[in-house]
Amino acid sequence: MNFPFLYSLNIVYDTDRSALDNKAAVTMSQNFAGKFVTKIRDRLEEFSTYQREIEKRRYVKVIPTLWVFGDTKQKLNDAIGRTKTVWAKEDAGAWQVEREGALEQTLFITSLLGGLYNVYGNVNTIDRHLYMTLDAAANLVPIQGDFSGNGLPNTILLGRKGQLVGVDVFAKGSTNHNYLVCAESGGGKSFWLGTLLMDAFMSGEK
């Protein structure tokens, strides 16, 4: 996404299963007809999965929030539309992003570091949480790591977070040894290619 945004995920460990168990029991015991059949069928499938896995996997409450920013109202609306499109894609999980209309300030505070206090039933009062397994929640955590390098540290680079990265373009474990050097005119392509080749030559590559 090519606009400013803030993504936050609060994970709440709650040993009380009664609320989810009650929802599952009520939903599984009822029959539905009409225009809500499809949605209810999906809920029944979700609760069936829950009842099968509850003894084997740990379920947690999660509150995912995504804030987008724009200098103008038009840019903000464009960013919101783009967000919905990106998250709705199948390879992104086919999420249905909904715009908050009642608890903007509360949810913004909970999105900040240390902003959520799980006391006095706050999470249930806010009622913006989802249930999922701990494994599923781990896939949504906003953690991004640097490239750790490959092979011998023939060429020493600096990652985006200041981490040293060793690169070996002729590493024996690589499936191929093709690489591409791209930059604008005068951007240092020749210098960078010369550095790669010299580092490889000095390390004994031929």
Image (spheres, rainbow, N blue to C red):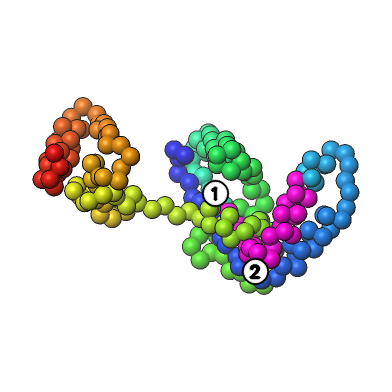
Q: Position of residue 143 (x, y in %)?
A: 45, 55
Evaluate whether residue 138 shows in this view: yes
Mark number displayed over residue 158: none
Q: Earlier in the sequence, mark 1 or mark 2?
A: 2
Q: Residue 116 or 11: which is nearer the viewer?
A: 11
Total tally of numbered discs in the picture:
2
Q: Is residue 190 magenta?
A: no
- Residue at x-position 71% and y-position 54%: 49
The reply, left or right, for residue 175 in relation to residue 28 is left
Q: Position of residue 199 (x, y in %)?
A: 14, 44
- Residue at x-position 80% and y-position 63%: 22
- Residue at x-position 65% and y-position 64%: 56
Q: Residues within 10 Å of mark 1 (few under 14, many from 20)?
A: some
The residue pinned by badge 2 equals 14
Foreground tag (1 vs 2): 2
The residue pinned by badge 1 equals 66
The type of residue carrying mark 2 is: Asp
State the separation of the CA atoms marked 1 and 2. Answer: 23 Å
Quarter holding residue 133? bottom right
Quadrant of the rendering where the C terminus is positioned: top left
Q: Residue 156 or 158: which is nearer the viewer?
A: 156
Q: Is residue 58 magenta?
A: yes
The reply, left or right, for residue 157 in relation to residue 100 is left
- Residue at x-position 53% and y-position 53%: 139
The type of residue carrying mark 1 is: Leu
Q: Position of residue 106 (x, y in %)?
A: 60, 58
Bounds of the magenta segment: 42-64
Secondary element at tag 1: strand
Q: Residue 110 or 41: which is nearer the viewer?
A: 41
Q: Position of residue 72 (x, y in %)?
A: 49, 37
Residue 89, relative to residue 22: is it above or below?
A: above
